[in-house]
Image (cartoon, rainbow, N blue to C red):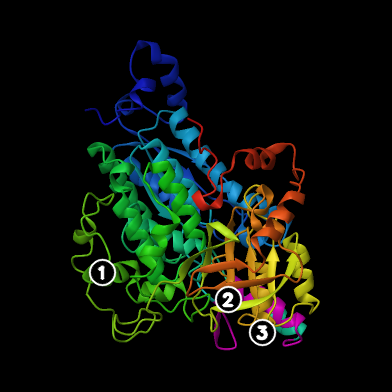
Amino acid sequence: MPDNLRSQVVTQGVQRSPNRAMLRAVGFQDQDFTKPIVGIANGYSTITPCNMGINVLAQRAEAAVKNASAMPQMFGTITISDGISMGTEGMKYSLVSRDVIADSIETACNGQSMDGVLAIGGCDKNMPGAMIAMARMNIPAIFVYGGTIKPGHHNGRDLTVVSSFEAVGEYSAGKIDENELMEVERKACPGAGSCGGMYTANTMSSAFEAMGMSLPYSSTMAAEDAEKADSAEKSAFVLVEAIRKQLLPRQILTRKAFENAISVIMAIGGSTNAVLHLLAIAHSAGVELTLDDFETIRAKVPVLCDLKPSGRYVATDLHRAGGIPQVMKMLLVHDLLHGDALTITGQTIAEVLADVPEEPPKDQDVIRAWNNPMYAQGHLAILRGNLATEGAVAKITGVKKPQITGPARVFESEEACLDAILAGQIKAGDVIVVRYEGPKGGPGMREMLAPTSALIGAGLGDAVGLITDGRFSGGTYGMVVGHVAPEAAVGGAIALIQEGDTITIDAPARLLQLNVSDEELERRRANWQPPKPRYTTGVLAKYAKLVSSSSVGAVTDLGLD
């Protein structure tokens, strides 16, 4: 089998002389037309600190591909900064960008008949976007994470961007003055790299390492450290070898790989967004995965890591403590990881972890000992009830009271909700409802980091519930429930809630309930009218037409066959 299995349709034969002429202009020489062509999907941009250091990694990978006797072709793909667009209309484009990224990588690689792809990304949607494309195309592929940001420092504490969001709530509640707010703002993000806690970017990079699609230890490296560029170079060599062996993503992205990823996400206290993204990747890989699988694994896996947002440490601290391999080895020893799952290196998970100690280092407390976990069970709970017949996702770590029944405070948008919080109109015991922010209704399923951080800053994090058909940032914690499905825009029960209705959120019972009779709900449903689309042209309009329920990953190609 030739190494240039796919690209030979472009480079071989008399009829391809014009094609080769074009390739000569970008650096190909006579001896290069039998080499495999490797796409480098470069997520570099100066839109966000998450991606501003990526170009150096892409260039390092490009040189390594050449040294491995293959031919690199670099192309760009977009990013949207969740942190910068947060709380604005622009945040509606964030989840949409996941599919734009997937579509762009698929388009470039298949349009140019590339033999494999190395994708480099930083901000939240870069990872799932790239992996959706890899699973769809099923050509040899590897993901390189751009790396995490180092923490900022102020008054003896580590800062992340979430510190700044929470400082807004503290300022609005009169707990800090404007000078303190500005000091946190100035120091929260000191350089390049993705947001530093176990937020969505670091959660997804960790998941991909657990799945075997990224190299060991690569998911928690700091963007600005030399080992990050070294890892990018090594990834390129590993990918070229995978092309020669025809080791394909769907051989790696098996049911066992997804279960491994879920186990690791539970152990590290990862983002609720991982649920949405893993469902979408599984769909592209042809692997059956449901919300119930997350609940099954949650019941078995303890939270081992003390990481922000609800904990104390950031990803660079986890890296120094042994990183994801240390967490994986502990899970493997306790039969909570599939050791026979394959990785992009050609080794199994068990082989990759062979030299990793069974217990974490004694001189740190980022990774807890097995007999002293943060929590006995995982933190991402799947709730159901008459408000979420398809399911909803709650992050329950760091919550002192995992049950609340209170009056509904209903808002038709995130902005209206935030205004009420900052104006002091939300009281302890309230259950906030933010609706028409789902995949179709938003459209784009905005994250609610601004309202949830404002609640934390105002001291209401343990006293108020919040439910939404939108999403939450990986930086969110508190008594919050997202991904409520069916969403309001399609007539889900969340659309029928009226101000003052009582709502029960019961995480231990996995219940999300509107305490209104079935007869009353049917009466309200008969009077409900679907809203007019908020957008009628452009990418948001197309997305709203195509997107599925969040309960199956908010994918845009469901049922097209």
Query: As rendered, which of 472 and 522 lies closer to the eye?
Result: 522
At horizontal 77% and vertical 82% (from top left) the residue drawn is 178
Query: As rendered, which of 389 and 204 lies closer to the eye?
Result: 389
Choose mark 1 or mark 3, whichever is in front: 3
Note whether residue 188 is visible. no
Amino acid type, mark 3: Gly
Choose mark 1 or mark 2, whichever is in front: 2
Task: Note whether 500 is above or below 362 in the view shown.
Answer: above
Quarter of image, res 21: top left
Query: As rendered, which of 68 and 427 lies closer to the eye?
Result: 427
**What x and y, as percent, mark residue 338?**
25, 59
Q: Total label count?
A: 3
**Is-magenta flag for residue 555?**
no
Dot 2: element: loop
Query: As rendered, which of 259 and 506 lies closer to the eye?
Result: 506
Alpha carbon distance from label 1 to label 2: 30 Å
Q: Which circle marks residue 329 in the picture?
A: 1
Alpha carbon distance from label 2 to label 3: 11 Å
Q: Residues within 10 Å of mark 1 (few under 14, many from 20)?
A: many
* Labels 1 and 3: the sequence-earlier one: 1
Residue range of the region highlighted in magenta in the rendering: 152-176
**In the image as oriented, which residue stretches furthest toward the front?**
519
Q: What residue is disc 3 on?
A: 459
Amino acid type, mark 2: Gly
